[in-house]
Image (tube, helix red, strand yellow):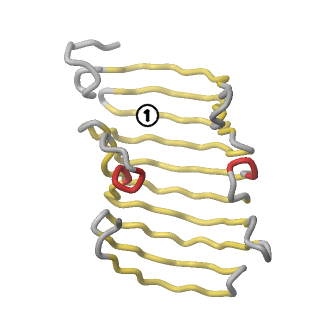
Amino acid sequence: DLGVMALKGTYTGSLTDFTADLLLQSELGQLRTNTTFNFTSDYANAAYKGKIALQQFDMGKVIGDSLLSTVTLSAEIEGEGLQTNDWNTQLSAVISDLSYKGYTYDSLQLNGRLEASVFNGFAQLKDPNLAFTYEGLISLVDTMPAYQFTLQVDTVAFKALGLSEEPLGL
């Protein structure tokens, strides 16, 4: 439930091939998109390219996770595929804040490719209480996930992150 919403913007094109430049404001936050879509005639698949931004958007309420709350991000996508096994998408995103378990993480960068349920790319977080660099792949399938990556953790303060009552850290 997004609550009371206001949507404004422009839509240019047909039902299967269009550009949408939209601003959605709701009780859960703000979503802005400027994206081009080209759907197949049966809507089973699509190619897309564009920018998406969330401003203090309560993603926890959207996905039903009480530990997650607001997210602010800016992302660019280009690719195709609507189902996870059809994905072939380049993704670049900066998450300027993400609130999880009462702590707001700062400055997460993602850059990579989603292909057939696999993310292959780079992630870096430079938060004062958690700093890491990740490079590699993660399978997003439920049955037998696969992982192959390099992770360098520079800082982790478990108590500050709300993950421990004891002052544990690196």
At label 1, the amino acid type is Leu
Density class for disc 1 (Cα within 10 Å; few <14, some 14-19, many ≥20) is many
Q: Would residue 79 be found to the left or right of residue 77 on screen?
A: right
Q: Residue at x 27, y 67 (%)?
A: 27
Q: Which quarter of the figure has residue 112?
A: top right
Horizontal and vertical percent position of residue 117: 69, 42
Q: Considering the image in quadrants, where does the C terminus appear?
A: top left
39, 144: nearer the viewer: 144
Residue beneath the point at 68% across and 66% down: 48
| Element on which disc 1 rests | strand
Residue 20 spot, x, y in % from top left: 57, 78
Give how far across and how far down residue 29 sits, in percent: 32, 64
Whole-percent x, y for residue 142 in the image: 63, 34
Total numbered badges shown on the rendered structure: 1
Task: Please say if 74 is above or below 147.
Answer: below
Q: What residue is rendered at 67% in x and 23% in y?
A: 148
Q: Is residue 111 left or right of residue 167?
A: right
Q: Quadrant of the N terminus?
A: bottom left
For residue 97, above or below residue 137: below
Q: Which residue is mark 1?
A: 125
Q: Residue at x 33, y 55 (%)?
A: 58
Residue occupying the far front of the picture: 143
